[in-house]
Structure formats: C-alpha cells, structure tokens
Image: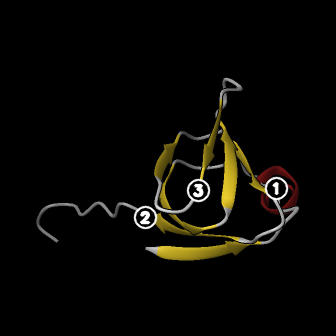
Amino acid sequence: MGSGTYLPGWKWSLHAGAQNGKPSDNHVGYVISGHMTIQDSNGHEQKVGPGEAFEVSPGHDAWVVGNVPCIALDFTCISHESGR
C-alpha cells in the first residue's frame, strides 16, 4: 500500500507518464481527500472523491479536479510463487 498527494493541476500523462515513458498500470485506490477524474483507455471518465474506492485498468489517465490536493491510497497485489 502506498499513498500519494496530487496537487491541483497534476495530470498523470503530463507529470508521471511523460517522465517515465511508460503507460499507466492497473490501480486500485481509495481517496482520502480532494477529487480526481479518471479516464479509462476507452475515454470513459469517472470522478472520485473522499471515501470512494476505485479500480482502473492499464492505459488510463487521471487528473486532479479543483483547487484542493487529492490524497489517495494505492493498493498493489503481490503474488507469491508456491514453494518459496
């Protein structure tokens, strides 16, 4: 589990994807404060805010909505191979 604070004006494709040169991964998250719009690879948009969980597929974009930072938790699955 990780957390992120995304400032007003932040957009994944401009501030993360452009820096690492990779498409976005699958994300499962929970918004603590602020609001964010998530756009899936088909162009469908979903606005999420405090107390809401979300799951987005690879190839999405996301950006902060409004003048308040968006603080969110990000959950990652860790797979284990049997016998190790």
Residue on which disc 3 sits: 49
Q: Is residue 64 above or below residue 8?
A: above
What's the amino acid at mark 3?
A: Gly
The secondary element bearing badge 1 is classed as: loop
Marks 1 and 2, Cα distance to the nearest angstrom?
20 Å
Residue on which disc 2 sits: 75
Q: Is residue 1 above or below residue 42?
A: below
Residue at the top extreme, as displayed: 42
Give the quarter of the figure containing the N terminus: bottom left
Residue 78 image position (x, y, % from top left): 33, 64
Give the residue at x 78% y 61%.
Answer: 16
Whether residue 19 can be seen here? no
Residue on which disc 1 sits: 11
Q: Residues within 10 Å of mark 3 (few under 14, many from 20)?
A: some
- Position of 8 with respect to 30 (left or right) is right
What's the amino acid at mark 2?
A: Phe
What's the amino acid at mark 1?
A: Lys
Which badge, 1 or 2, comes first in the chain's sequence? 1
Whether residue 35 can be seen here? yes
Say which of marks 2 and 3 sits in front: 3
Give the residue at x 70% y 46%.
Answer: 37
Which badge, 2 or 3, comes first in the chain's sequence? 3
